[in-house]
Image (cartoon, rainbow, N blue to C red):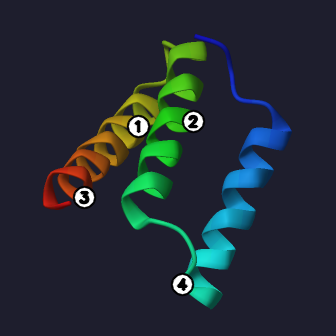
Amino acid sequence: MSRPTISEVSALLADLADFRTRGTGSRAELMNRKADLLERIAAAQPEDVQAAEVAAAARARADELTADG
């Protein structure tokens, strides 16, 4: 699992901004992308417990949103 690139993070931030201002996109899809990026960051830094906790919380929320449809 590779660490996310700056362009991947920038794209997510731009899409999140569009979602907030215009309501475009899917909240569940955006949360899944966010969780994926955070999981990749945590995997690249296995000694960082806080990064793992944040990634796990993001994944749990993404799974909730996906289950809700």
Spatial distance from mark 1 to mark 2, Cα to Cα? 8 Å
Q: Are marks 4 and 2 in contact (CB under 8 Å)?
A: no
- Identified by mark 3, the residue type is Leu
- Look at the numbered disc 1 and give the secondary structure of its residue: helix
Mark closer to the observer (4, 1): 4
Q: Are marks 4 and 3 in contact (CB under 8 Å)?
A: no
Spatial distance from mark 4 to mark 1, Cα to Cα? 24 Å
- What label does residue 23 carry, if any? 4
- Identified by mark 4, the residue type is Gly
Mark 2 crowd level (few <14, some 14–19, many ≥20, 10 Å Cα): many
Q: Are marks 3 and 2 in contact (CB under 8 Å)?
A: no
Q: How many marks?
A: 4
Mark closer to the observer (1, 2): 2
**The image quarter in which residue 31 lies:** bottom left
Q: Which residue is mark 3?
A: 65
Residue drawn where x is 68% and y is 21% of the image: 3
49 and 33: which one is in front?
A: 33
Q: Which residue is mark 2?
A: 37
Spatial distance from mark 4 to mark 3, Cα to Cα? 16 Å
In this image, 10 relative to 55: left or right? right
- Look at the numbered disc 3 and give the secondary structure of its residue: helix
- Identified by mark 1, the residue type is Ala
- What label does residue 67 carry, if any? none
Which circle's residue, 1 or 3, is located before the other in the chain?
A: 1
Rendered position, 20 above or below 11:
below
